[in-house]
Amino acid sequence: MLPAAILSSCAEDKFDSYSIPEPASLAETKFLAEYKVLKDYNVGVPLGAVVDVSEYTSKGLVYGLTSTNFDEVTAGKKFMHGALVKNAGNVNVGILSDFIKSAESAGHKVFGSTILSNLDQNTTYLGTKGILASHTDPNASGGVLTELKWVELVANGDCEGDSNESLFWTVAQQGPSNATITSGAGKDGSKCIVLNATAKVSQAWDNQFFIKFSESLPNGTKYKLKMDIKAATAASGIASQAHANPSEYIAHGTFGTVDFTTDWKTYTNEGTIPSDGVQSIALNLNDFADANTYYFDNISFEAEVEREADPFYWENIVSNSDCEGESVESFFSTIAQAGPNSSTISSGVGKDGSRCVVVNATAKVANEWDNQFFIKFTEPLANGTKYKFTMDYKADVAASGIPTQSHSQPSAYIAHGTFGTLNFTTDWQTYTNEGTLGVDGCQSIAFNLNSFADANTYYFDNIVFEIEKEHVVGIPLTAKEKHDTVKYALDNYIKNVMEANKGYITSWDILGNMFTDNGALDTEEADNKFLWASYLNGPDMDGSNPNEYIQLAFKLTREYFAANGGNEADLKLFLNEEGLDKAAKLNGVTKQLTTWEQDKSVKFDGISTSITASYSEDASALNAEKKKVEDLFTALAKTGRLIRISGITLDYKDASDQAVSAKDMSVEQGKQMGTFYAFIVQKYKELIPANQQAGLYISNIFDNGDTPCGLWNQSNNSRKPQYGGFADGLQ
């Protein structure tokens, strides 16, 4: 439903039963009421607007204005790779699906955002900290660079600090704004969130409380939610939703249904995230019809997420440590100089009646090492290795002063006393020894049981010898691995986008931001760029096919468009480049398009570009701006391709070339600016042949900050004088 502000306007600006408000009752702006909606003047030229995604999908003012005045909408950069692809590589297409549903209900066509670009890509995911990062040696022990850890994702959840970066709310359609933290109202008199929700306004979501996480979560992430809650009046059945950012809806009921009582109670909910891109919990406080005050304290949201593993980890290098299995590959003994032979594991005599190693040593034969027990490791150790050694041990007869030695293989002596001295008693006890090895090549511990002169039986159980290891990292991807990885990323992105599209959007900017101002292909690397051509230029990334990235973009877009309900004959693909008023750039672009199209799989139907210009009170400056527009349209027409103006953004300069801010503009200046809008629209219709006119878009419905580029006043939704000029141009 549209907001109440739209319900009281002139009849010409209605959408279904709703209309745009009357303009301000000033004599000098009454002329604007005589204009019809823009679509009524427009014949043949697709008329479009760049819109804010959340404002459009909420079906409020922006939705109403565009529905009554425009044929098409686009979301610009909001649906490019950098916005849709998260750092983990998941593609948040839910927001695109919602946008398309809103467009369907409004009867709007949608122009698709640029699919492949050097700019506005998620360079974290695509870069050397993402899919192109050096990888772990697959032969290394210890495995992975990351591990799953439970992490708290809500900042200041106990509300005792001042930060409210995780806490937002929307009251009576206003917001979302940061929630207020109040002292003394929390559990046990602490600080907490206090929300004064109004009575139900229109929809269930008009009063919402949002808990925003510090990162976006992919589908399948395990979570634990816990918070203390109460309300001034008991309110049951408060539904929850999953959102991306607050007010960017993804799914309903994800975090359960909450019942508020007038006393503090603890709410808990745990499970798995059902969709990609979830970063917020929304609680629909408006599910309770009356005004109410809600209290939230000690808010905790933990998620099991990947985190960089500790650089070092401990690994046990003794096989069958607890002796419960059959393996004796780590246990050997030499009895009366015979051996070393595999030791015996016996049942029922270990600690707590378990199994253990049993060594029956004879009386002293000749030397102290003639009766020895060996623990052999699974690998030799280097000098400086840190270790932790523990085991349970006892003997039939107490025997003190049993020394240890370091060996390589059992009976291949290295050094004496390396792992301490043991004192056996007739009861089980635990031996511990840790330190740093001072010898090289040690792979065995030897216990000199012959140091006790008499025959004796020795028992060993739960033998653990851990060493500190470092994760092995830093093996760069080969050229082919980089190529295949980037190719997969492109395939996965286009596949997800076209699955969400379901054939609805038939016109797309397939390529953009590829050229320098002199018309050459951009090859200069920068932190804010991702140069697809650097990776997709031949199977071995060897330059054997420098146009591979273009060919792949066309191939994948067509295939996935058709596979998801689209009619490939309807698909129109454009190049999007800014600054085409520079002759050198436009010349270079048109030549390169012809070069690319020598491969018959590549066909650019049209060119998209925007116009950024200034209305100037200085006549010569204004004439120069007008000439740039005329020259641009004339040159674009000569390409023979469809021409789409992806956005028009004007500002106003006074006679001294100083910008005039929106708040300082007079009605007369707005009218003058409107004549420039009229000039641009008329010249597009005049200089671009009718069969090449692919669309005329405005960049801003409302002013962009201080820049007076909008056609409506956002404060009261009334038409600006510039509206009249734009409408004149369409007639």
Image: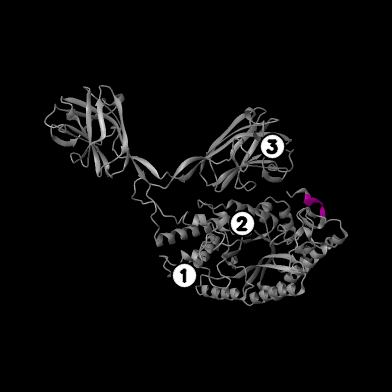
- The correct choice, above or below, for 585 with respect to 258 in the image is below
Disc 3 marks a residue whose amino acid type is Leu
Earlier in the chain: of badge 1 and badge 3, it is 3
Whether residue 389 appears in this view of the structure is no
User: Nearer the observer, disc 2 or disc 3?
Assistant: 3
Q: Determine the secondary structure under disc 3.
A: strand
Circle 2 residues within 10 Å: few <14, some 14–19, many ≥20: some
Instruction: Look at discs 1 and 3 and give the one toward the viewer.
Output: 3
N-terminal-most mark, 2 or 3: 2
| Horizontal and vertical percent position of residue 659 | 73, 64
Find residue 78 and name its label: 2
Q: Is residue 7 magenta?
A: yes
The dot on residue 195 is: 3
Kind of element beneath mark 1: loop
Instruction: State how far apart marks 1 and 3 are (Cα).
Output: 58 Å
- Quickly name the residue at label 1: 546
Amino acid at circle 1: Pro
Query: Image quadrant of residue 500?
Result: bottom right
Q: Quadrant of residue 695?
A: bottom right
Where's residue 91, x and y in %? 54, 53
From which residue to which does the magenta span run? 5-9
Q: Is residue 312 left or right of residue 70?
A: left
Q: Is residue 220 visible?
A: yes
x, y (%) of residue 532?
Answer: 50, 63
Closer to us: 416 or 271: 416
